[in-house]
Amino acid sequence: MNSTVNNEPNRRDFVQLVSGWCATLFALAASGAAAARFMMPNVLYEADRRYRALKPDDYPEGATFLPDARLFVLRKGNSFRAVSAVCTHLGCTVLHNNDGNGFHCPCHGSQFNENAAVTGGPAPKPLPWYLMTLTRDGRLMIDASQEVKPDKYLVV
Ligand code: FES
């Protein structure tokens, strides 16, 4: 009569035990990673849209195109303002009209008057005007993240 009980774990028990611990550790790690990710804000940081331009006296009368910023600085005497050169239709760069008044888009023919309002073509909105200020060292600062009305000038 042999009634011994085998209390030693066999191979199957061992594999199940290790698998269970691995699954538990994986679940804890995944939960920890999810909690850590949750603590980080879902924010898209936009690039700084302020452009430091030259000093007012460096700009001639009329329109000057700033290619890096894709905008025009317009000077009329000692008054300055800045307008976007990005067409509101599909984003082409608009050109200043040769007669000195208004803008036109070479892509699909939109026309904008001297206040950047649409006068023709498929553009749905006027070109935006941007806030212009003077820096401490006397240079023009254009903030393309802040739109202003077309009649807002910086007078220096
Ligand atoms: S992109 Fe300017 S009119 Fe189409």
Image (cartoon, helix red, strand yellow):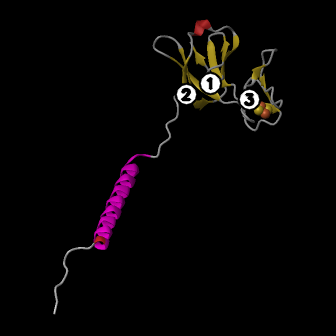
Residue tagged by mark 1? 152
Q: Earlier in the sequence, mark 2 or mark 1?
A: 2
Q: Nearer the viewer, mark 3 or mark 2?
A: 3
Quarter for ligand 1? top right
- For residue 108, side relative to residue 59 (left or right): right
How far apart are labels 1 and 3 at the CA level?
25 Å
Amino acid type for the residue under numbered disc 1: Lys
As displayed, is residue 42 above or below residue 70?
below
Q: Secondary structure at mark 2?
A: loop
- The reply to whether the magenta stretch includes residue 47 is no
Image label count: 3
Q: Secondary structure at mark 3?
A: loop
Q: Position of residue 125 (x, y in %)?
A: 73, 36
Q: Earlier in the sequence, mark 1 or mark 3?
A: 3
- For residue 65, side relative to residue 3 (left or right): right
Q: Nearer the viewer, mark 1 or mark 3?
A: 3
Q: Earlier in the sequence, mark 3 or mark 2?
A: 2
Q: Nearer the viewer, residue 41 or 52?
A: 41
As displayed, is residue 137 above or below residue 29?
above
Q: Are marks 1 and 3 in contact (CB under 8 Å)?
A: no
Residue tagged by mark 3? 92
- For residue 131, side relative to residue 93 (left or right): left
Q: Are marks 2 and 1 in contact (CB under 8 Å)?
A: no
Residue tagged by mark 2? 49
Q: Is mark 3 within 8 Å of ligand 1?
A: yes
Q: Residues within 10 Å of mark 3 (few under 14, many from 20)?
A: some
How far apart are labels 2 and 1 at the CA level?
19 Å
As displayed, is residue 29 above or below residue 61?
below
